[in-house]
Each structure stands twice: as structure tokens, then as C-alpha cells.
Image (spheres, rainbow, N blue to C red):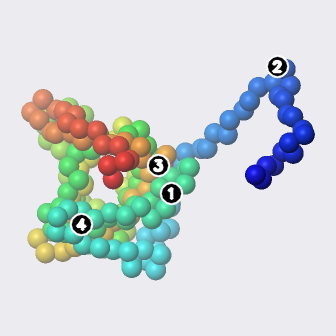
Amino acid sequence: MISSVPDDITTQQPQGATVSTVVVPHLSQRELAEEVRRIAGRPAEWVSRVRLDPEGRWYEQIHVDDRYELWLISWLPGQSTGFHDHGGANGAFSVVWGALDERVAPRSGIAAAVRPVTQGVVRAFGPRYVHDVRNTARDSVAVSVHAYSPPLSAMTRYELTPGGLVATATETRESW
């Protein structure tokens, strides 16, 4: 057995000493947007990973550490996320091919605001943000890069009803 402490030495924490933990800082919305711009501008790092799946959006995590994660997502015409949050994480995304529409959940009422996201545009958001991203093109593929901090551990899915958003399910990392 290999040990970093020889068998004949015992270690004890001094009485009254406190144990400190390392807190890993999360990336801000601005920092995530910068990271998305950086990776979007380096297609050699991700273009060979893009896949298309007629059954649903294709996605691959292309980076993860304690601070943030990056995802690459491809979208065929008509594919969408449905309304969802990001489980308390900050986020940012950018389209690198094609175009997407982002429907932002209303704070009140039932009409969702639709914002086009074209190539090079970066959207950044905070932890309570609920949106639906979709490829509304009739004949064009879209590819996007997404960043989250801290890395996602759960996402809640919602339905937009006449009474507002209603939570319908929560997904955890294990289901991705």
C-alpha cells in the first residue's frame, strides 16, 4: 500500500483549529458569455463533434470542471427544448450555424416574447431564467454552444398555461 503519511507518524488537528473548505467561484453571466464567444470562434475545437439526430436535439458536453461546463447542441428544423430553467445556474449561449428563436417565459400573462438568436449573437442569463429555444427554420440546421456555471445538476421543465408557467418535471444530470 502506498501512503503519503508513513505508518509510524500520526497526525492530529490542533485543538480548536477549524477545517476550511475551498469554495470554487462560479462564473458570472459576462464571463460565461466570453467563454461562449471564445469557443464559438474556434470551430476546430468542436466542428467534428456535430451530429444530427431526427429523433431530437443532439448534444454533447465538450468541457466540464468545478466552475462551469460547455455543451454543443445541434438542431434540425422544428426541434426545441420546451420551457425549462437551469437549476440555479447562470448561463449563456450562442448560435454558431443557422439561427434559433428563444421564447422567454413571461413574468405575468401568457404571451412569451420571441427573440431571434442569429449567428454570433450571445444570450446570457441568471439563475431564475426560464426559456424555450427552438429551430423554427423550415429547411436549415442550427448549431449552438451553451455554458453554465455552476455545472448543471438539475433542470425543471414547464408548460405555459393560461395561468402562467406550471412545473411539469425535473431532470437531473443522470438523465442526460
Q: Distance between the residues labelled 1 and 3?
A: 7 Å
Q: Distance between the residues labelled 3 and 2?
A: 35 Å
* Tag shown at residue 75: 4
Q: Distance between the residues labelled 2 and 1?
A: 37 Å
Please determine whether, in this image, residue 23 is positioned above or below residue 151: above
The residue at the point 74 percent across, 30 percent down is 19
The mark that comes first in sequence, 3 or 4, is 4
In the figure, residue 75 lies in which quadrant? bottom left
* Tag shown at residue 151: 3
* Amino acid type shown at disc 4: Trp
* Mark 3 residue crowding within 10 angstroms, few (<14) / some (14–19) / many (20+): many
The mark that comes first in sequence, 1 or 3, is 1
Residue that badge 1 annotates = 64
Q: Do the residues labelled 2 and 4 touch (CB within 8 Å)?
A: no
Residue 163 lies, in percent from the top left, at 12, 29
Q: Are marks 1 and 3 in contact (CB under 8 Å)?
A: yes
* Tag shown at residue 16: 2
